[in-house]
Structures are given as structure tokens and as C-alpha cells.
Amino acid sequence: MVQVQALIKDRELLSYPCPDGFRIFLCCHADIMKLNPPVGKSIMNAGQKPVEATARAIIHVDMDAFYAAVECLDNPELKDQPVIVGGLGPRGVVATANYAARVFGVHSAMPMGRARRLCPQAQYIRPRMSRYREISALIFSVFRNFTPTVEGLSLDEAFLDVTSSLKLFGGLEEIGLQVKQEILRKTGLTASVGIAHNKFLAKLASDAQKPDGLVYVRPGEVHRFLDPMPVSRLWGIGKRTAPKLTALGILTIGQLRRCDASILRPVFGKRTEHFQNLARGEDDREVQPSRPDKSISHEVTFDTDLADRRELLAELLRQSEKVSRRLRAQELMASTVVVKIRDAGFHTVTRSRSMRACSNSTRTLYRMARALFESWREKHKTTPVRLIGMGVTGLEQESGDGKAAGDRLDSSTEKSLDKVLDRINQRYGDAKIVHGLALRRSKEDH
Ligand SMILES: [Mg+2]
């Protein structure tokens, strides 16, 4: 088994503290910001004079070829070579290709076999998620130096609402530039930055001059920026809708914007107005500061389909170990366990069960996952499995004494064992000793 994907929403990094004293200052600042009027409205100030609200100021930051860039950073020999990061098994897909590899037509989500045919000379590297998370935490600490309103979209991408920070940092373009410089200084990596008065435009702007770009779309420049773009750049217009628009002779966002709504209605129905608003560059969504993870999961696609019960259980135990370790690292407990199984025919089932109390013990979570797996297997005894995954939801904060409300599931022995294993892991990384134990334990469970 080769391709392991961490499906966690990459949000835990957001709880990392800002390393310098700057945050204290920002907290005070955030309080002041609460007093600011909501966008688009005016309020009366103490002197009863109307205060006009300013438009939003949004920055979208996207690291350039992030995983590949981190690999080049850690191994400078790779610099200037095509580098492709992703699953290396026969069913692997490209997670990130650097720009030297993109020249050959390689892009993310492409099957690895295709990438190898297009660019056989590239360096192929397995993802090192824990290293990417580490760098990501540094990047997000930079964001928080500029505003507390940060919405992480992935490890290397976020929206920043800097409306209230403008005066402090000397204007929008100046903030964009400072964010880029600060990221480069702290990590040695380049980011592309898009600036606009809403999220939709800021995201398109960050993509407009990659890599190492900085694009500011001013309110008066929206049509000039958007009109020439293909309609597929609008969120929600994919492979199914685009051909229908092509049939109507609508290829660009400008054409969509100017088109009479009655012509579009057969394609978009009730969402016609929504898409024409987007084509005009209008988008009201606020930057939503990220919350902690809602779920944590791991899954594996096997190189060859697997029907052996013991091997499948051993994999579930490995995943339970990883998931529970991440729970404990974040001082979280979970109430629901989910198991995902995809068979050779690509039928996917998910089974979930809530526990009578929360847990973050490897053994408890594994027992639950195993029961879910066994209930599936009763009816599918000889079905080969292509993918198996294990996850948890219903997360809540562990209280100081290691218990969530009503927690009675995890015995003190289990807790001590988990603690010891966590410590070994912290010290030696993903140590073989833990995997060996996982396999042995799975045997004992039979
Ligand atoms: Mg990126």
C-alpha cells in the first residue's frame, strides 16, 4: 500500500500561537474592530455624525506549488528540476507539480502514470504531510500578524480580511507586499497574493500572475479583469455547464455578464442571477475565521485490491492509531467513528456509529472501527477492497483532567499506553515500533 492521504481539513494548524508578542497587540486591535460598522451600512458615532463604512479589503494568499516547493527547500539539489509530489503506487495521483514539471503538461490530480509518461525525468516524491503542516503553521502565523480574520482553505491557502488593518499597515498593496515578504523571510518560499474588495475577485487575482504574483483588482477595474476570462473560471461552472454556454455562443465572463437573463435561464434556472452577479464581480461572502477541525480521518488506496480480513484489520488499526494520536495532540475527543470502504467495483460505503461517551484512545476507537468493518464484511466476505479509511467526528475539547463530559470509555491503562506511544512517536517520528505493535495488536484481537 503506497498512497496514504491525510484527509484532515488542515485546520489544526490554525491554533498555533503566534511566536512573537504581536498577537497581544492584534487582540486589542480586534476589539476596536468590533466597534466598526458593518460593511455597506452607516452608524451614528458618539457625536451623532454618520460614519460611512468602507468597502471590504480582502487578500487571498496561495503558496506557489507548495508541497513541491517545500521539497526543493529541504533539498536544494532539486531546485530547477521538475519535481512531482504525490502517491507513487500504480493508483497514485499528483498532489503538486512544480513549475519546471508543469511545462511538460503535468498538473495536480493527474494520475501518476500519466505524469511519468509526460515527464519521466522528474523527481518523484511521496508527500511528507507533517513537514508541510509545520511550514503551514509558520505561514498562518504571518497571516495573523496582519489580521485576526483569517479563513484557511488548505495548508497553503487563505483569505485575509484586512479591512480594519489598512491604516495600521499603510494600505492594501503595502499589506499584500508585506505578507509576501514576511512569508519569504520566515519560510524561504514564495506566495502569490490577490487583492480585491471581495473573496471571488481576490482568489482570481492571486492566480493571475503565478508564481510570486501580486495582483490588485481595483473596483473600477473589475470588468477589464474579468471580461476576457473563460466562463469556466466562475465558481460552479464546470464540465457540464460550460458546453451548454458554448452552444449559446457564450465563451467569456464578459459575454455572460452582458447576456440577457432570459437566454441564460434554460442553462442556470434559478441560479441565473447568481452567475450574472459573479460575472459582474459581485460576491457578498464574508471571510469566516477558521474553526478547529470538525473531523479527522485517514484512508489508504491499496496498490492491489485486498480481501484478507487480517490485513484489512491491521490497516484499520494503523489508521486508528494515527487518528487518535492527532486527537490527543490537539487535546480533542471524538464521539463518532466512521469507516469508509470502497470495493473493486468502485462502490463506496461509509458506516458510522456514535459511542456512549467521547474517546481519544487508540484501542477504543479501533474497537469501534473494527465492529463497523465486521458488520460490512458479514455480507461481503470475499469482496476485494480497493480503499479503506477510518475517521472520527463529533469532536470536543478534552478537559484538563483528560476527560470530556461523561467520558468513561477509556481506562487509565489505555491512557498510559497511548501516552507512552505518543512520546515515542514525538521523539522518533513514525517509528516502526508503533507499526509493529499495531500489527501485533491486530493479531491479538482475532
Ligand atoms: Mg497553492
Image (tube, grey):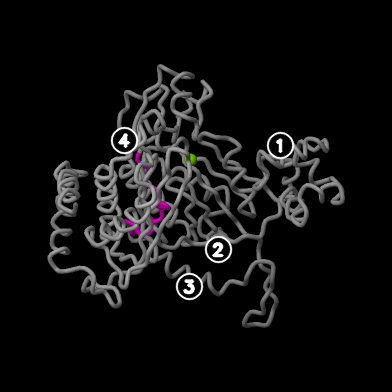
Mark 1 within 8 Å of ligand 1, using the beta carbon: no
Label 4: few (<14), some (14–19) or many (≥20) C-alpha neighbours in 10 Å: some
For discs 4 and 2, the disc positioned in front in the rendered view:
4
Read off the residue under disc 2: 164
The residue shown at (32%, 34%) is: 2
Q: Which residues are magenta?
A: 4-19
Question: Left or right of 71: which side holds 256?
Answer: right
Q: Earlier in the sequence, mark 1 or mark 2?
A: 2
Amino acid of disc 2 = Ser
Q: Quadrant of the N terminus?
A: top left
Badge 3 crowding class, 10 Å Cα cut-off, few under 14, some 14 to 19, many 20 or more, is few
Q: Quadrant of residue 395?
A: bottom left
Local SS, label 4:
loop
Marks 3 and 2, Cα distance to the nearest angstrom? 11 Å
Q: Earlier in the sequence, mark 3 or mark 2?
A: 3
Crowd tier of the residue under label 2, counting other residues whose Cα lies within 10 Å: few below 14, some 14–19, many 20 or above: many
SS type, badge 2: helix
Asked if residue 413 is positioned above or below residue 267 in the image, the reply reads below
Seen from the viewer's position, the closer of residues 168 and 181 is 181
Q: Secondary structure at mark 3?
A: helix
Q: Residues within 10 Å of mark 1 (few under 14, many from 20)?
A: some
Query: In the rendered image, which residue does mark 1 sit on?
Result: 230
Q: Amino acid at mark 1?
A: Pro
Q: CA distance from mark 3 to mark 4?
A: 50 Å
Spatial CA distance of label 1 from label 3 is 42 Å
Horizontal side of 54 relative to 135 (left or right) equals right
Which residue is nearer to you in this view: 193 or 309?
Answer: 309
The numbered mark at residue 1 is 4
Q: Position of residue 378 (x, y in %)?
A: 35, 52
The image shows residue 433 at horizontal and vertical percentages of 14, 44
Residue marked by disc 3: 31
